[in-house]
Structures are given as structure tokens and as C-alpha cells.
Image: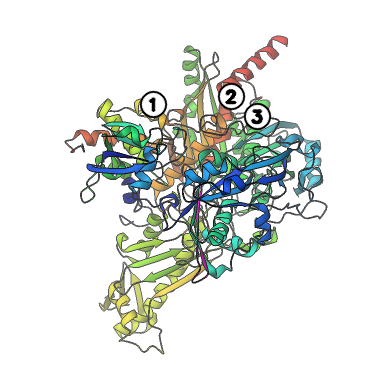
């Protein structure tokens, strides 16, 4: 066991971890941030996507100790818990971009990263291509694509972005 | 229609928690003192378990127990069962082999659980599992269903590995129709084996409270009461009233979470043995090796046509793979959920279907989205499409000629279709798809060296499962009614307790819409509870597109009673005769007067009981109902798929999709369209991408998302989804159900489109680029030879 310290959703956290502890296990089991999900164990499904230092990362493919000093953002930290939803969260709700909700946190974190990299005007083929690392079994992606296009636009309209 | 009533596209109540990461799934549950289970699984498809040496493992740090099938048997933990009895042609009953939660003596498929290690942490359990030495004697195995009946016997009870040889329909009349036919279309089919792949893996936590002798199971199930019933009455874990099953948020089911699985039994058993909560969460590789698979049929079918193009008969012979053990409802899928739909949307005077179900050394096969109905639709819709091509008639016209036009319609295979308008959905779909412009688009594709094809699927399904007496007469071990309780609080807000369970369907929203609509109260004043056997009355759960047609009907029935009781209370308040009280828009009025009482006032008066004596009218406002449907419902529609095939690579791209479905009354069109999208995606997955592959030794070759290809966003087109409506006369709101339609309609529409594009009918699913390319080469070689 060794100590690891990082910032998660703006808060400094530290804990002792087994060297084999994955970031997703650290988030879910040590910090009880259970919004980040595990769907496949092989980096195929993207249910575990979080942001590390501003970039989308599959948290099942990185050890917790590798993130010493990193800044991690999870679905729980995307919007102020007492404030309105993040525009991308709102877009998923508005466009019925989710059904069972299990892939949703990873989808939303991927979508926000997509906007950060590709801008606010995302066309259908771009969104579909950019979603290659995320699986959804419920929606057929139709409404996820619509939600991301709308969420991207909304994010461009002066919505405050979390750091 | 109000903004939140029936028919409104209300945004979902559930989504606030899901988009913020506050959903509460089984793996999110953490019980005080919880320890972790790791299962040792057979690496062989068929093997004798000669010995299990667990000494080294038991001594590993943190290990609490290493348990095997022998102890399970010693503790008299019963076998898992299949709850639908199928009787063979010769009158014998299906051959159900023992299915212990931990294999005892012999493992029958790769992934069969042989032992379980329980330790303080999952890592410790995994480390210890590596020290367990299991000595196997490998036995010959069979995975391929077509050779199952001539392979070495797997279970003592089932010679030739045959579970049943069942039939339905009129053999003689069908034979006569085929003999007299002007044209017969014959086809061989393989309905590919699928892995349901809900993104949330299965999970279970067993907890024992020694003080009360109560057991609790948190479980990823679509039907917590059914799980409790089976684990109690058949497995014998605990009396029903001493076992609580909680299904919290469940991340997709698609049928695979209906069934009672070994791991949940073992978690309960181990929790009681160890005295601590025991948690297990499937890894995805375990999900591939243990979640019940779907489909897996081999079929030969012939459709007879007269000179006018009318279908005169249909004969079908199917072998269905049920895997190594009979899963909970497996026997019903290739029989009563399959052959009963072989009439499709057509008037077919004679149908005969024979089904052999077989054991193989593979994961058990059971209901997966559509369950039998996609397989039936594939047979019927391929035959009519190919038949049209063979006789040179437009496939849409041949369908029209054969559509059932008068309702109710009794098919030769049990079902009585109650309502529908198949012409209407076809006509609307043809317009939306611009079928008339297809030739022009085909020529345009040809200019880009692409082959364009169009394929139809005018499907039907039987949903709203199901009238209890009817399914009982067919061998079902349970009734398929649904329950509801409506609790009105003194302040007028309402809780609905439903026996249905949601795992993506949005019941918390749609059920609240129905209540809001009926009682005229704000949508936000209604909450829906489900998924906990301690809170909710016995219910049958969610599958078979039943929650709307059956679950909502139970709520409506309870609301009828609520209204009747509330009227009595209002009559006392307004000092009027009960018969003079009218209830509309949340207000009780004395007919012909301006005297009225608001919903909230009546609710409060029901509880304070100041205006009536408790002897003449019981205080309170809470009513329950059990609704048993009078018939199945029959959603139907028309899907049209257009593809472009690149003849150089064989790659098929879906370039347009039109769906026009008739689901009867729609409570929330946004949610219904979402169900159609998801169903189509799974159907396209079956047609183009997905297929579970076993090698000759019974090893699952497609054991992860690296090898088993789930559709991704770029595999699917934007979908055009529309509706026509004929109300179901079989339930109070006229709902038919929508959950499975897409998965039923889609596969055959895709295959009809690709075969239309490439000009050969010889094409297997999944129609990957390689498969299509090979089909094209074979056709070209044949053409050259001819």
C-alpha cells in the first residue's frame, strides 16, 4: 500500500492504495463516487470515462498511483450539485439521450471532451465517429447524437465550464 | 391533452439522477462488513470434476471460505429450474436436467461455476482462486446445435441431447397446401446466436441478519418477486417471507436479467454461512460466459403460394439450442413465443411447425429482446420477400395481397389478433421512405459503383404478456397478470407501487403521466415505486413489452377503485348522493350545481374522516389491483431498410431506415420512439455485426467486446420513426407495447435489403463485409458457370 494524492472534483483527496488499484476503483470504492461505471473491463465500453487534467480518460485503464498530483473530474463534479445541470447533462435529459442510464456518465464526459476538442458546432458524422469508444445498448445512439449536437451548441452560449 | 398527460412527450423524472451520476445500481450498494465472491469457472466445455484441492487457497490472506458444489448439495440448496413445461409430440414431458448453482461432479459449459472463493477484498479472492487446484477429466463436447442430436450425451435425462420434440399446427393440411401450390419458396436459415450485453454487468449482494433470520438479495433483476419465488420455493434458500429481493436501478436487461442465476443463489448461501454480506459483480468476460444468450436456431421452411400469389401454407422445422442447462423461461421461447407468430400479418390457412430443442455444451439460451418473435418474423418475412422476387412481383404488393384485413382474426397457430391496420402502416412507410424514388437512387448508387438494395419487414408480435389462464394451459408455471397499488396521501400526492420493474423504460415518468392524467393532479405530485419485495406487492416484472399493456392496466384498475372511493368521501363532504358526484380535472362536483371539492380536500377528508363515520366508510384512500389481460396485444408495423453495398469490399452501409409502428395508445411518444431506436439498433446488430461463435471444443471465441461486435454510433443511421394507431381492445387504455418491435422487425429488413442489392439470397447473419463479399463471389462464380 502506498499513499496517492490528487484533486477530484476540485477537492484534494489522499488515500493508501494497493498498486493494482485502478483509478475507477479509487473513485468508486475509496471515494464512493459511484457515478463512474464499469461496463467491460477491457476499455471497450467507455462507461468509466472521466477527465484527467482536462482530457477524457477511461478510468479502468489507468492505475490510481499514476495520477499522483492530477486533476480529475467525474460526472459528479461536472455541475455544481446545488446549481443547474451542465448544458450537456441538460441536453441528454432534453433529447432523451439515455434510457437505463448506465453508459450515461461516460457518454456525457466523452461529449464534453468532444466539444473541448472539436468546438461547438458538431455534425452528425463527427459525433458518431467521436463516439467510437463508447457503447450504449439502449438508445441506438440516435438521441445521444442529437443530445451531443444540442449540448455542444448550448456550451457555446456562454455556459460556465468547470475547471 | 395536458402537458404531462397521456400522449405528451414529458421529459423523464429518472434523468436527474442518471445524468448527475446519482443513479443507484447494485454495484453502487456497499453493505457494512461486506466481503467479495470470486467464482472459479470451468475452462472446459464438458468435463468431470475429479477433485478440488482448496487447502492452499483457504490459507491465503483474507480468505473467508472456499465453497464447492458438494457443500451446496450437503446444505440441500436446490437446483435452478425452468418454469414453462413443454410437452413433446409423443406426450412426454421436456427433459429438464439438474442445474445446481455450483457444478457438482461435472461441468457442462465453459464458464460453469465450479467453486467460489469469498474473501475480505476482491483482490484477495482472486489471488486465492489461483491457488485452488481443480482436476478435470475432459469429456467430448458439442457446441453446434445442428450436430447436437448425434453427439455424446450431456445429461442422463436427455437421450440424443433432445429436450423436447414439439409441434404446432396442422401437418396434413399444410402438406396438402404445399402439394397443391403453384409456387413454393424454400429457404434454410440460421438465426445467429447473440449475447444480450446490457452495459451494466449482472451483480448480486446477499446479506443475512441472524437476529431476524432474514435474507436480503440486492440483484440486477427485471423481476424481483419472481426471483424471490424461485429462490424460495424451488432453490429452498429461505421461506418467501424471510427473503427480501431488491432490484435498485438496473442498467439494461433485454431479457437477460429475467432469469434466476447461480451467482445470486451462491451469494445468499455464502452470506448465511459466513455471517457477512457477500457481493459479486460480473466482469464482462463472465457476462459473456454466464448471461443467458439469445436466438440460435437452425430452420428449414417452405411457403406455398397459389397462382394468384396468395399464401396457402407454411411449413417450418426448427432446431433450437438451449445450451447446457434449461434457463428460467428457455423452453417457451422457441415454442409458444415463436411458432404462434408464424402467421405474420398474413392470412395463411395452414401452418405446421416442428421444433426440436437440444442441449449443447454452451451457455444457456433464453429470452432476448423479442424472444422467439424475431426468429418467427425472420422466417416469414424472408419467405415472402424471396417469394415475391421469385415470382416477379413487387414485395410490397405481395404483402398487400396477403394482409389480414378483418379483425378479430384467428390464425391457425393459437393467436387471435384483435386489431390492426397493416395496409396503413405499409402505406405510410412507403411514402416516408419514398419507395417510388428507389429506382432513381439505385441508379445514382450504381454511378458510384455501389449496389443499392431495399428490404421490407412487415412484422407482428404478441406482447402484453399475458392472459394467465391461456399461458397456464400452454405449460407456463406462473400467471402473467400485473399488480399495482395506488396510495393517496392526506395532502393529495400519490405513490404508485408497481409490480413492473424499470431498467431503462422510464416507468417513473410514464406511469406518473397516467395517474396525473386520470386524477388531474400535477405530474410532480406522483411518484412510482418498484423493485423491492418488502415495499411492493407481488408482481411479475418487466419483459415481453408488458409494462404498458399489463402494468399500466393494473394501475388504471386501481385508479378506478380510488375514484369510486373518493366519490363516496366527496358525497359526504358535499352532502350529496354518491351517484350525483362527478369527477373531472381533479375536481368533484355535485351534478347540476356549483358545489365542488378539490382533489386535495377529498384526500384530506378521506384520512381525517370527520365527515363520515368509520363504520359506513373506511377511512383512508389506498387501493390495489391485479390486472389479468384478456388477450395478448399485437403491435405490428412496417420497417423499410435501404442499404448500399460496396461490391469491392462487401461492406454494407444502412443509408436509410423508415419505421412505421402501430403500438396502439402511446403514453409518451419520446420514450416510445427511444424504444424503437434501441430495438432497431439491436436488430441491426444481429443482422450485420453480432454473432456468438464457439469453436469445435466448445470454447467461446467471441468472449469480449473486442471479439463480439456491438453496434457503435457510426454503425447506425439516423432513423425515421413514425406511427399509425389502432387501439388494442384488450386493455383499458388501448396500449399494445413497444419494447421489442425494433429488434423483431430489423434483422430481416436488413437482410432483405442486402440480398436485394447483391442479387443472391444465400446470405448468413451477421452479414459482415467478408460474408457479403463471399456471397457476391459465390454468386458471380455461379453466374459464370451458368
Q: Name the residue under label 1.
A: A129
Q: Is residue B444 visible?
A: yes
Q: How crowded is mark 1: few (under 14 residues within 10 Å), some or many (20 or more)?
A: few
Is disc 3 placed on a helix, strand or loop? helix
Residue shown at 31%/50% (left/top)?
B16
Chain on which label 1 sits: A
Relative to B2, is B446 on the left or the right?
Answer: right
Marks 3 and 1 sit apart, C-alpha to C-alpha, by 35 Å
Marks 1 and 2 sit apart, C-alpha to C-alpha, by 28 Å
Residue B200 drawn in magenta: yes
Rendered image quadrant of residue B694: top right
Is B282 in front, or is B775?
B282
Is disc 2 placed on a helix, strand or loop? helix
Q: Mark 2 points at which residue?
A: B756
Circles 1 and 2: CB atoms closer than 8 Å:
no
Is disc 1 placed on a helix, strand or loop? helix
Where does the image place residue B423, in percent across and percent down from the top left?
54, 42
Q: Name the residue under label 3.
A: B386
Chain on which label 3 sits: B
Nearer the viewer's eye, disc 3 or disc 1? 1
> Which disc is residue B515 wearing?
none
Amino acid at each position: 500500500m502506498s499513499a496517492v494524492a490528487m484533486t477530484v472534483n476540485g477537492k484534494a483527496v489522499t488515500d493508501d492504495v494497493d498498486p493494482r488499484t485502478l483509478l475507477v476503483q479509487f473513485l468508486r470504492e475509496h471515494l464512493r463516487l459511484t457515478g463512474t461505471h464499469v461496463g467491460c473491463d477491457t476499455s471497450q465500453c467507455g462507461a468509466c470515462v472521466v477527465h484527467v487534467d482536462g482530457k477524457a480518460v477511461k478510468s479502468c485503464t489507468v492505475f490510481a498511483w499514476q495520477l499522483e498530483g492530477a486533476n480529475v473530474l467525474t460526472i459528479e463534479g461536472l455541475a455544481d450539485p446545488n446549481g443547474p445541470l451542465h448544458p450537456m447533462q441538460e441536453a441528454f435529459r432534453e433529447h432523451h439521450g439515455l434510457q437505463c442510464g448506465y453508459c450515461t456518465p461516460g457518454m456525457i464526459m466523452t461529449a464534453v471532451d468532444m466539444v473541448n476538442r472539436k468546438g461547438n458546432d458538431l455534425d452528425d458524422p463527427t459525433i458518431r465517429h467521436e463516439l467510437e469508444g463508447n457503447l450504449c445498448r439502449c438508445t441506438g445512439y440516435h438521441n445521444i447524437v442529437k443530445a451531443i449536437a444540442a449540448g455542444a451548441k448550448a456550451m457555446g452560449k456562454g455556459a460556465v465550464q468547470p475547471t | 391533452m395536458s402537458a404531462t398527460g397521456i400522449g405528451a412527450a414529458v421529459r423523464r423524472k429518472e434523468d436527474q439522477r442518471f445524468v448527475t451520476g446519482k443513479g443507484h445500481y447494485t454495484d453502487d450498494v456497499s453493505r457494512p462488513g461486506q466481503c467479495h465472491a470470486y467464482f472459479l469457472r470451468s475452462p472446459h466445455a464438458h468435463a468431470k470434476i475429479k477433485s478440488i484441492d482448496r487447502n492452499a487457497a483457504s490459507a491465503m490472506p483474507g480468505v473467508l471460505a472456499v465453497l464447492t458444489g458438494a457443500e451446496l448439495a450437503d446444505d440441500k440448496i436446490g437446483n435452478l429450474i425452468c418454469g414453462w413445461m413443454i410437452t413433446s409430440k409423443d406426450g412426454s414431458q421436456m427433459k429438464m436436467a439438474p442445474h445446481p448453482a455450483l457444478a457438482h461432479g461435472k461441468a457442462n459449459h465453459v464458464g460453469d461455476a465450479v467453486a467460489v472463493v469469498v474473501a475480505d477484498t476482491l483482490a484477495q479472492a482472486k489471488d486465492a482462486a489461483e491457488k485452488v487446484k481443480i482436476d478435470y477429466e475432459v469429456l467430448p463436447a458439442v457446441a453446434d446445435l445442428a450436430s447436437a442430436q448425434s453427439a455424446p450425451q450431456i445429461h442422463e435425462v436427455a437421450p440424443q441431447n433432445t429436450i423436447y420434440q414439439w409441434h404446432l399446427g396442422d401437418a396434413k393440411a399444410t402438406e396438402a397446401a404445399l402439394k397443391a401450390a403453384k409456387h413454393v419458396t424454400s429457404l434454410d436459415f440460421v438465426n445467429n446466436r447473440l449475447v444480450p450485453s446490457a452495459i451494466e454487468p449482472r451483480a448480486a449482494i446477499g446479506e443475512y441478519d441472524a437476529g431476524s433470520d432474514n435474507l436480503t438479495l440486492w440483484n440486477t433483476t427485471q423481476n424481483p418477486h419472481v426471483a424471490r419465488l424461485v429462490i424460495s420455493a424451488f432453490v429452498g434458500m429461505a421461506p418467501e417471507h424471510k427473503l427480501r429481493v431488491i432490484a435498485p436501478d438496473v442498467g439494461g436487461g433485454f431479457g437477460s436479467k429475467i432469469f434466476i442465476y447461480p451467482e445470486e443463489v451462491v451469494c445468499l448461501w455464502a452470506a448465511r454461512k459466513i455471517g457477512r454480506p457477500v457481493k459479486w459483480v460480473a466482469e464482462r468476460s463472465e457476462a459473456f460466459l454466464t448471461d443467458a444468450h439469445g436466438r440460435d436456431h437452425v430452420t428449414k421452411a417452405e411457403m406455398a403460394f397459389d397462382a394468384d400469389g396468395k399464401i396457402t401454407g407454411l411449413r417450418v422445422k426448427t432446431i433450437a439450442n438451449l445450451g447446457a442447462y434449461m434457463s428460467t423461461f428457455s423452453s417457451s421461447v422457441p415454442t409458444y413465443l415463436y411458432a404462434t407468430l408464424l402467421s405474420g400479418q398474413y392470412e395463411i390457412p395452414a401452418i405446421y411447425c416442428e421444433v426440436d430443442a437440444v442441449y449443447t455444451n454452451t451457455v444457456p439460451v433464453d429470452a432476448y429482446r423479442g424472444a422467439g418473435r424475431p426468429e418467427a418474423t425472420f422466417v416469414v418475412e424472408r419467405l415472402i420477400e424471396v417469394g415475391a422476387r421469385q415470382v416477379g412481383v413487387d414485395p410490397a404488393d405481395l404483402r398487400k395481397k396477403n394482409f389480414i384485413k378483418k379483425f378479430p382474426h384467428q390464425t391457425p397457430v393459437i393467436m387471435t389478433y384483435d386489431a390492426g391496420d397493416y395496409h396503413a402502416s405499409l402505406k405510410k412507410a412507403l411514402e416516408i421512405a419514398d419507395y417510388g424514388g428507389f429506382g432513381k437512387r439505385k441508379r445514382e448508387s450504381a454511378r458510384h459503383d455501389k449496389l443499392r438494395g431495399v428490404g421490407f419487414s412487415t412484422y407482428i408480435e404478441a406482447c402484453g404478456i399475458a392472459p394467465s389462464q391461456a399461458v397456464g394451459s400452454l405449460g407456463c408455471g406462473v400467471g402473467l397478470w400485473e399488480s399495482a397499488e395506488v396510495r393517496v396521501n392526506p395532502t393529495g400526492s400519490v405513490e404508485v407501487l408497481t409490480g413492473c420493474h424499470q431498467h431503462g423504460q422510464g416507468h417513473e415518468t410514464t406511469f406518473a403521466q397516467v395517474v396525473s392524467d386520470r386524477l388531474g393532479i400535477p405530474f410532480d405530485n406522483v411518484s412510482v415505486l418498484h423493485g423491492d419485495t418488502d415495499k411492493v406487492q407481488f408482481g411479475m416484472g418487466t419483459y415481453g413489452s408488458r409494462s404498458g399493456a399489463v402494468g399500466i392496466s393494473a394501475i388504471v384498475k386501481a385508479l378506478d377503485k380510488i375514484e369510486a372511493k373518493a366519490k363516496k368521501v366527496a358525497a359526504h363532504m358535499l352532502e350529496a348522493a354518491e351517484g350525483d358526484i362527478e369527477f373531472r380535472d381533479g375536481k368533484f362536483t355535485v351534478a347540476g350545481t356549483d358545489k365542488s371539492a378539490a382533489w386535495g380536500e377529498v384526500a384530506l377528508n378521506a384520512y381525517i374522516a370527520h365527515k363520515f363515520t368509520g363504520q359506513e366508510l373506511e377511512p383512508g384512500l389506498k387501493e390495489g389491483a391485479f390486472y389479468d389481460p384478456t388477450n395478448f396485444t399485437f403491435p405490428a408495423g412496417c420497417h423499410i431498410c435501404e442499404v448500399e453495398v460496396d461490391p469491392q469490399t462487401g461492406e454494407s452501409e444502412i443509408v436509410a431506415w423508415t419505421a412505421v409502428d402501430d403500438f396502439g395508445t402511446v403514453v409518451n411518444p419520446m420514450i416510445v420512439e427511444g424504444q424503437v431506436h434501441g430495438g432497431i439498433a439491436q436488430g441491426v446488430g444481429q443482422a450485420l455485426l453480432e454473432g456468438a461463435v464457439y469453436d469445435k471444443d466448445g470454447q467461446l471465441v467471441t468472449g469480449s467486446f473486442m471479439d463480439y461486435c456491438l453496434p457503435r454510433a457510426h454503425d447506425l443511421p439516423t432513423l425515421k420513426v413514425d406511427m399509425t394507431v389502432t387501439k388494442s381492445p384488450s386493455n383499458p387504455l388501448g396500449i399494445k407495447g413497444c419494447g421489442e418491435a425494433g429488434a423483431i422487425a430489423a434483422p430481416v429488413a436488413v437482410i432483405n435489403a442486402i440480398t436485394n442489392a447483391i442479387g443472391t439470397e444465400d446470405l448468413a447473419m451477421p452479414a459482415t463485409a467478408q460474408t457479403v463479399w463471399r456471397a457476391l463471389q459465390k454468386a458471380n462464380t455461379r453466374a459464370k458457370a451458368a
